[in-house]
Amino acid sequence: ENDLAQPRRVLLKLSGEAFGNGKVGVDTATIRRIAGEIVPAVEQGVQVAIVTGGGNFFRGAELQEAGIDRSRGDYMGMLGTVMNCLALQDFLEQAGQATRVQTAITMGQVAEPYIPLKAIRHLEKGRVVIFGAGAGMPYFSTDTVSIQRSLEIHCDEVLMGKNGVDGVYTADPRKDPSAQRFETLSYKRALIDNLAVMDASAMAMARDNNQTIRVFGLEGEGNVTRALMGDSIGTLVSN
Ligand code: UDP
């Protein structure tokens, strides 16, 4: 009944680019910094779930171009996201933060299976839950999974952490100096203008289910904490 009594619950999407800092493999300094910025928000009572991307290892579509069967390449991509989960888990645990990894492809030695009600319980106990292996299905993206997980475990907001850009712009700010950042943006406009928020299927799912997304830059000092706490940084995308 009392909304104020409900703790804030968010879904943070960290792309493979964030984990690799633009390179193949994991950039441990970057992951350590991001982990260090997650902890203060959890200490303030924010419930944090995370979906990891995997583009720093493999993308099925790219492997397909190199001659690998698309679905098999997609599974390779999904396995890459799990390595990112484990790296982030380690730095969070080192910072004293309790964590659980849940994967959409079962691998009992390294992670729990994805069990939504259990994930919610972990969040209520102050544990950070990290979701790996995407949806467990080829032809999906971790962007789409971010929206799906957020809806299923009832998050208030999806926070899309970006590398190299701090929100959604009217044009690519790296190419067009007159590009302007949106403070707020509708899904309709984002889809029509083909703006770089997330892939189109993810955005359609967010629009159809009224899921609010904040796109923000991962790089500014303290930005991750700010986004988790609910500061109005970056661009808010909603209906
Ligand atoms: N992937 C998949 N199904 C999923 C999630 C991911 O097949 O549900 C595969 C797909 O090949 C994708 C790769 O895993 O390219 C890495 O995920 P994504 O590209 O979403 O990562 P990001 O772009 O965020 O680094």
Image (spheres, rainbow, N blue to C red):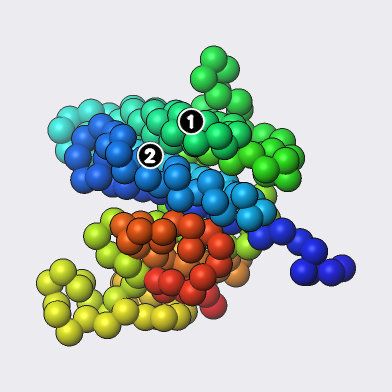
Q: Which residue occupies 19% across, 40% down?
A: 23
- As helix, strand or loop, the secondary structure at mark 2 comes to helix
| Crowd class of label 1 (few under 14; some 14 to 19; many from 20; radius 10 Å) | few
Residue at 40 percent across and 47 percent down: it is 34
| Tally of numbered tags | 2
SS category of the residue bearing label 1: helix
Q: Amino acid at mark 1?
A: Gln
Q: Is residue 70 visible?
A: no
Image marks 2 and 1: residues in contact by CB distance under 8 Å: yes
Residue, disc 2: 32
Residue 113 percent across, percent down from the top left: 61, 27
Vertical arrangement, residue 224 with respect to residue 236, above or below: above
Between discs 2 and 1, the one toward the N terminus: 2
Residue 210 image position (x, y, % from top left): 60, 69
Pinpoint residue 231: horizontal percent, then vertical percent. Answer: 51, 70
Horizontal arrangement in the rendering, residue 20 relative to residue 50 (left or right)? left
Left or right of 233 on screen, residue 27: left
- The label number, if any, that marks residue 94 in the structure image: 1
**Kind of residue at badge 2:** Arg
Q: What residue is shown at x 21% (from left), y 45% (from top)?
A: 22
The image shows residue 174, relative to residue 26, as above or below, that is: below
